Amino acid sequence: MDAFTTHRGLVAPLDRANVDTDQIIPKQFLKSIQRTGFGPSAFFDWRYELDGKPNPDFELNQPRYADRSVLVTRNNFGCGSSREHAVWALAQDGLRVIVAPYRGEGNDFIPGFADIFKNNCSKNGIVTIELSEEEVESIFQTVYAQEGLMATVDLEAQTLILHAGDGEKVFAFDYDSSVKHKLLNGLDDIEESLQYLNDIERFEETHATWIHQG
């Protein structure tokens, strides 16, 4: 997995709450377990008309957002099934960062992202940023007001900077330290385990195994 330290990219809006994984990548595309070729099918039912042509009413089809790599959306993004294909599709569509708001607290708390989706993102090099609803609304308004709005995400500093025409806007975000470490060093779960390969091999050499040695 490629390390994520800082990223500067074009911001695009998806002003929809409760976007589930079937909307991100519909079930008919789950036949393949290869991690390639899913990008053009991201948001398929919204992205294309019945004849296969791009739907001009879908916001991400607007030419101004063609080179997007930072997505701002609404709460509970990635809910639904646990399919990792949804994250593969978003990553292959060019996304490196997704921003969503949390709402409420306690029993009324609604997260920015569904837990499994959020974990799948970190395993595939996508940074998910949760901010308050007021902060995310501010980002939406800035995106709409300024064509070509760029943002820089610094994972080490845990900041999102909008390069707005009327001055930079800085948003600080929380991030799990263990997940942050893996992203900064480009480690997926397997690569993290391989850091301890010598210890694993020494353990195997000194402990009996249940595997039959024919």
Image (cartoon, rainbow, N blue to C red):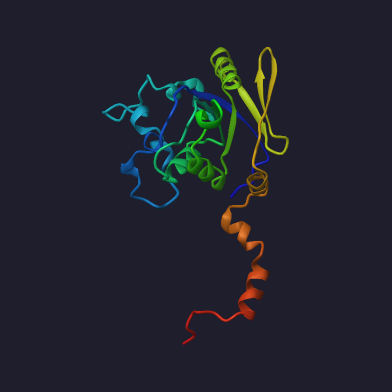
**Residue at image point 66% right, 21% down:** 163
**x, y percent for residue 162:** 65, 22
Using the rendered view, name the quadrant where residue 104 is placed: top right
Q: Is residue 148 left or right of residue 199?
A: left
**x, y percent for residue 33:** 40, 52
104 or 44: which is nearer to us?
104
Q: Is residue 52 above or below residue 2?
A: above
**x, y percent for residue 48:** 34, 28
Q: Is residue 71 visible?
A: yes
Q: Is residue 134 left or right of residue 169?
A: left
Q: Is residue 3 above or below residue 9?
A: below
- Residue at the extreme left of the image, as rendered: 51
**x, y percent for residue 152:** 66, 29
100 or 87: which is nearer to us?
100
Tally of numbered tags = 0
Q: Is residue 133 above or below residue 31?
A: above
**Residue at image point 70% right, 19% down:** 168
**Residue at image point 62% right, 57% down:** 192
- Residue at the extreme front of the image, as rendered: 107
Using the rendered view, name the quadrant where residue 25 is placed: top left
- Residue at the extreme right of the image, as rendered: 157
Q: Is residue 5 left or right of residue 84?
A: right
Q: Is residue 111 visible?
A: no
**Residue at image point 45% right, 49% down:** 35
